[in-house]
Image: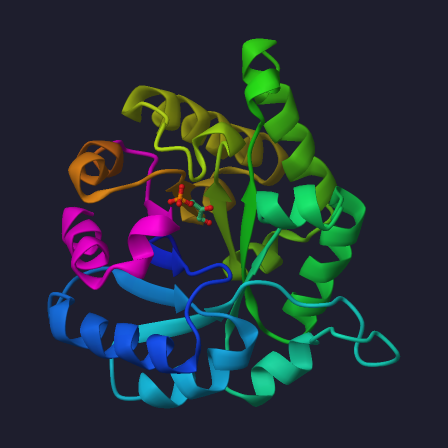
Amino acid sequence: MRHKIIAGNWKMHKNAEQTEDLLNDLIDKLPPDVQVEIIVAPTFVNLASAVDHLEFTNIDVAAQNMHQAESGAFTGEISAEMLKSIGVNTVILGHSERRAYFHENDALLASKVNSALEHELRVIFCFGEELKDRQAKQHFSIVENQLHDGLFHLDAKDWGNIVLAYEPVWAIGTGETATPEQAQEMHAFIRETIRSKYGSDVAEGVTILYGGSVKPDNAKEIFSKPDVDGGLIGGAALNAADFAAIVSAV
Ligand code: 13P
């Protein structure tokens, strides 16, 4: 069901010791008793230790990616079942860095989503337009196509395990965040697009996160918008005080 989430995508940062240090720092600094789900996504090699480390906390662990096949000759890859086997219950799919640098297209992502859901992994599905799309005023159609091609093959019942993360590519790691109005406008469009395909129950039930240069000083304004249910945080998730401030802002 729709609820507030703040998720930290650590990308390719933090070795084993640094992961432990940051987790300890987060446990110290995160506000207790918050009405928001908190998720961190360390690298693959540190997932199992993070799950152990966070066992008695209110912080969940997500993976940043997975392969779509059950198992097989796919050197270097990790399956949904493997993630489940170490206690990971959520996976980020479709991040713009996966799309851009690893050539993940919508058809591939649709098969990853299927595999994740078959293994009862919740999916944080990322999508968003590039700067050139926005400049050409095609951002709505790009986003609509990403939703259509990546997720609209699902049944309504599958949406209970889908969280959306709208991340305009031009705002990721650039320090240039979408304005709260731009975020709200797009989130409302996303919810409306889902409503027209699946109806109001699914549309009102889905959690839609915003990602792209969310920092302690801009978080509150972005999160105050009615269709923004939280954030997917990159750089600021690597600093416990900043991440805690963002959690407090939602
Ligand atoms: P930044 O917060 O560093 O812009 O990254 C956002 C992001 O890509 C989260 O997945």
In this rendering, would 174 be left or right of 139? left
The percent coordinates of residue 238 (x first, y second) are 32, 59
Viewer-proximal residue among 240 and 123: 240
Check if residue 120 falls in the magenta segment: no
Viewer-proximal residue among 68 and 117: 68
Image color mode: rainbow
Check if residue 234 falls in the magenta segment: yes
Bounds of the magenta span?
225-250
Is residue 152 something that shows in the picture?
A: no
Q: Is residue 57 above or below residue 143?
A: below
Q: Quadrant of residue 177 in the image?
A: top left
User: Which residue: 32% across, 81% down?
Assistant: 20
User: Which residue: 51% across, 70% down?
Assistant: 43
Q: Quadrant of residue 73 in the image?
A: bottom right
User: Which residue: 57% across, 28% down?
Assistant: 129
Is residue 79 something that shows in the picture?
A: yes
Indicate the quadrant containing the N terminus: top left, top right, bottom left or bottom right.
Answer: bottom left
Task: Tally the marks.
Answer: 0
In this rendering, would 104 be left or right of 12? right
The percent coordinates of residue 162 (x first, y second) are 53, 56
The percent coordinates of residue 205 (x first, y second) are 42, 49
Which residue is most to the top? 136
